[in-house]
Structures are given as C-alpha cells and as structure tokens.
Image (tube, rainbow, N blue to C red):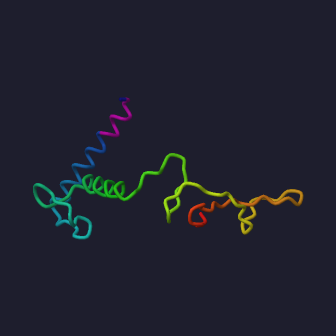
Amino acid sequence: MSEFEQKVINLLEEINSKLDSLLKMEPPASNLTEGIPDSESGVVKPSELVEKLKEEERSQERPPVEGRRICPDCQGTSFNTVEDKSQVLHQMGGVKIYAKKYVCRNCGKEI
C-alpha cells in the first residue's frame, strides 16, 4: 500500500471513531435505523447502515443476461429491429439516419 493510501485509511478510521462517539451521545434517528438492530446500545454505525442499504439495492437488482435484450413482458430474447421514424439522429445530403427500436417477436412489445 502506498503512503497516500495509508493516510487516507487512517483519516477514515479517525472519522469513523468520531462518528461513533457522536452517535453515542445522541439518540438514533428513527427513520434511518428502523429494522437494523445494533448489538450494544441500539445505535447503528453509519458504515453498517450504508452496507445494509447497498445489500438491499443488490438484492432488488436482477443481473442482466450477458449481452442480450430481454422483453419485460414475456421474457423473450428474439427481437426485430425497426427504424424509429419519430427520432431522426442525423441528416446528411437529404439522407436521414433514424434511431432503432426493437420489437419482441413473441408479444410485439416495443423496446
């Protein structure tokens, strides 16, 4: 680890300890700490709260299928490519370049 990284880690540890001491003085905020128990005093450390929120976000996200589109209605993966005439991307010499939209072959949903 470089000297700079070590200094940053030391500063972060100092900030965390100061936050812990401040939180011990004040009652916990009810809207942020609901449902997250603390083992000692009922006060949640900020780092624990951030980790809990990140874990909830990860559990809600669905991992994408590698490089493939998925229809939100029927979960199909085959699409027809159609020009979207409502969106002109570029025009040069009278030739218009349109945006693409994808139409599911199973249910017809446009993406």
Q: Give the residue furthest to the right.
A: 93
Residue 70 left/right relative to 81: left
- Which residue lies at the image location 60% right of the left edge and 66% below the top edge? 108
- Residue range (magenta): 2-9
Whether residue 58 is in magenta: the answer is no
Q: Quadrant of the N terminus?
A: top left
Residue 7 left/right relative to 90: left
Q: How many discs appear? A: 0
Quarter of the view holding residue 80: bottom right
Quarter of the view holding residue 6: top left
Instruction: Indicate the position of residue 36 as horizontal and vertical percent values.
Output: 20, 61
Instruction: Indicate the position of residue 22 as horizontal and vertical percent values.
Output: 20, 58
Q: Give the residue furthest to the left.
A: 40
- Which residue lies at the image location 66% right of the left edge and 61% below the top edge? 101
Residue 91 left/right relative to 106: right
Instruction: Indicate the position of residue 74 as horizontal and vertical percent values.
Output: 50, 63
Residue 44 left/right relative to 56: left
Task: Identify the main secondary structure in magenta.
Answer: helix
Whether residue 7 is in magenta: the answer is yes
Instruction: Indicate the position of residue 30 as horizontal and vertical percent values.
Output: 22, 70
- Which residue lies at the image location 27% right of the left edge and 49% below the top edge? 15
- Which residue lies at the image location 63% right of the left edge and 60% below the top edge? 102
Along the viewing direction, whichever of 16 and 67 lies nearer the viewer:
67
Above or below residue 65? Residue 42 is below
Q: Quadrant of the C terminus?
A: bottom right
